[in-house]
Amino acid sequence: MREIRNSVFFFLALALVTGVAYPAAVTVLSQLIFPEQANGSLIYGGAGAPVGSSLIGQPFSNARYFWPRPSATADFPYNALASGGSNLGPTNKELLGQVAARRETLRGYGIQGIVPADLVMASASGLDPHISPEAALLQVPRISGERKLSEKKVRSLVLKHIEDSQLGFLGAPRVNVLKLNLALDSGENRD
Amino acid sequence: MHANIIFDISQILALLIGVTLLVRPLGGYMKRVYQGEGVFLGPVLGPLEGALYRMSGVRKDEEMDWKHYAGAMLTFNLVTMALMFAILMLQGSLPLNPQKFPGFSWDLALNTAVSFTTNTNWQNYSGESAASYFTQVMALMVHQFLSAATGMAIVIAFVRGLARRTAETLGNFWVDMTRGVLYILLPIAFVAALVLVSQGVIQNFSPYKSVPLIQPTSYERPKLDANSNPIKNADGKPVTETVALQEQTLPMGPVASLEAIKELGTNGGGFFNANSAHPYENPTPLSNFLELLLILMIPAALTNTFGRMAGETRQGWAVYTAMLLLFVIAVGALYWAEYSGNPLVQKLGVGGYSMEGKEVRFGLGGSALFSASTTATSCGAVNTMHDSLTPLGGMVPMVLILLGEVVFGGVGSGLYTMLAFVIIAVFAAGLMIGRTPEYLGKKIEVTEMWMSVITVLTAGAVILALVAIALITPAAVRSMANPGPHGLSEVLYAFASQANNNGSAFAGLNGNTLFYNLTGSLAMLLGRFAPAVSVLAMAGSLAGKKYVPPSVGTLPTDQLPFIFWLVAVVLIVGALTFFPALALGPIVEHMIMQGGV
């Protein structure tokens, strides 16, 4: 009996410490020191309203925009309320069929040869904001054709948006698709 | 995507060095915490600790024998499990629920309550679309502290059993649990949470935010009738309708505070469905590296705490070395399998390693390290979808779990399971070379062998029995997402993960069914508490023994031959138990993949 009373007491007491005081203190300090990150790393448009988060990818499909990674989130791609991957196994015919179809779409836009895997295989979160620099550069001719811009300008815009490994060796070089597309729209590409 | 091998090897080495450097200071700190010595946080948290004991009437110096200790531990876990079950069922009427999520179904609430109390964090729900902020914080996160502190208390009681001579008691459960939370888990999690926010992990209590899409789009969805059944056309195909998609809804929440303890307590239950693959849980390669450190630091450092408390630090380093060896083998195998990629995809004109279920920012090194670390320990957080790993790449996490999570392992549970293996190894070696089985001056006798065998084999027996039952239950087979040997891998992984309290998944399997919710709860309960009670019983037996000074007949357990022997015993026990099941799952699938479907 005594241990049942102790169990309830220690649960309630430690829940106050770890479930109330701790998250409250972390929230207050983060909001003071890192308000931008704590609130979702939002990107604000010209009118001051948020247009997206630099950490969450968006479902660009128009040929005028750089395409992000395929997304397997439920209902529709880049559904931020249903993060997750396809969970298709490596020998699953459905996976191989999807990859072949995406490869065909790229061929339709004149992309020949070997393509980088990130452009035809779905991410783990379904919200991956990045693609590899190779995957971005491969799309330069399409963008330049659709937007009537010189390839050189589009390419230099991509190169400007490559984020490097952290501390020199952590992680892979990458390009944030939403930021790159916002730059395209904003006219940063013009002279 | 091509892997940068130099960077990836650097990252692996940096992690191994980082963890190893933490072993001694953190191990020493934890020893002082559990021996009730002064620590630098004493002046800050001491008054709070004292108040808790005064209000509850727990006396700091009141020691418990093993039965009392186990009884308090079990009572605490059952009571908190029941309270959490209630919170999950009543979620709809509790505060901090801006998205108005309803309560869980009873079987899902049971599975989730068992899961978080047993340090498993298997999740048959998806956080962003089912759990309110109140649930995330008060039910899930609080248990991430309590279950971790419980595991640590058990191993500390066991180490006292090894270290004490002709003693009857093992310490006080309430004191060990409280000190573990206040002096170890809370301060580290607090600092880590702030660093994670600096990288972009969110921390707020706002409602979800909607942003307009830069490029609005549309999607097809099945048309539903008034009873929300899909409408079918004359050919029996579902009718679809086109829906315009103008905006994206971004989930919010107090993620960083949960993220830190989720990794530190080797819990693994994420705020979001995608877990540590979600950019709001793990936004950068640096946050990924920090999370890796958090996962490994306490299980690794506990080996040193053990060595110090047993009075022979070399014994702690010997166990650490055995763990490290197994870890390096696992990371190497996983990295190699993924680096080699999927030939079926490469044939379609796709370059580099397979990116299905991986995120760009982590690179192959950050993904492979995470998959290995999360299953070597009992963490179970993922930044890569294990279901989509190559067959042999996916077998590595499965094997790490099946070995009983002794490669660092869960906080507390990893070390006590490994010490059970040490006792079996000492006994087996003693039989072979005709020496008396002794460990740390304690004779290994019938009780110790029984309890060690229960500790080591419970999970295996539970896994194989439940997989067999699942495979002859049609409803369970229908939950598989992938056909053929991969489907078997999904079911094997599910029960392995739950019985060993890991919590990661081959997530294609639909686990939120009555069958998996109930069988999973059973696996988690047996896998957690059968070893926990056996270990405490063994501790009680060991504590009462006399100290036998080492003689020429004693097998030295702190030298390389014994370390290799320990690694071999772990691998042999695992292989004998699971080889047939692995051969029918991942190994067959590897052959299919190499041969072409």
Image (cartoon, coloured by chain):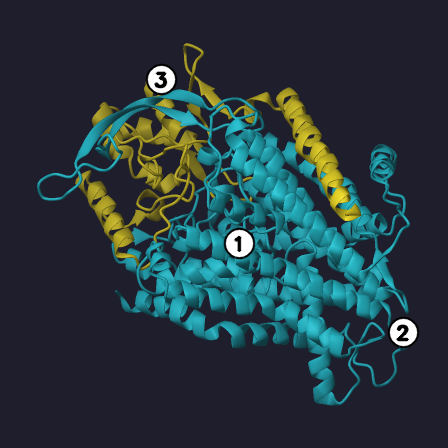
The residue tagged 2 is B547
- Circle 1 or circle 3, nearest the eye: 1
Q: Is residue B98 left or right of residue B264?
A: left
Q: Which mark is residue B521?
A: 1
Q: Is residue B469 left or right of residue B569?
A: left
- The amino acid marked with disc number 1 is Ser
Q: Are marks 2 and 1 on the same chain?
A: yes
Q: Chain of mark 3?
A: A
Report, in whole angstroms, how far the alpha carbon at label 3 lies from the one at label 2: 78 Å
Q: Which chain is cyan?
A: B
The answer to whether the residue labelled 1 contacts the one labelled 3, judged by CB atoms less than 8 Å apart, is no
- On the image, which quarter does residue A181 sit in? top left
Q: Position of residue B108 (x, y in %)?
A: 48, 45
Chain A is shown in which shade?
A: yellow
Along the line of sight, the residue nearer the viewer: B13 or A89: A89
User: Which residue lies at the image location 39% right of the left edge and 71% below the top edge?
Assistant: B584
Element on which disc 3 rests: helix
Q: Position of residue A47 (x, y in %)?
A: 41, 9
Looking at the image, the residue that sits furthest to the left is: B234
Looking at the image, the residue that sits furthest to the bottom is: B434
Q: Chain of mark 1?
A: B
- The amino acid marked with disc number 2 is Tyr
Q: Quadrant of the C terminus of chain B?
A: bottom left
Looking at the image, the residue that sits furthest to the top is: A47
Visible in this render: residue B560? no
Q: Chain of mark 2?
A: B
The residue tagged 3 is A186
Along the line of sight, the residue nearer the viewer: B287 or B497: B497
User: Which residue lies at the image location 29% right of the left edge and 28% below the top edge?
Assistant: A65
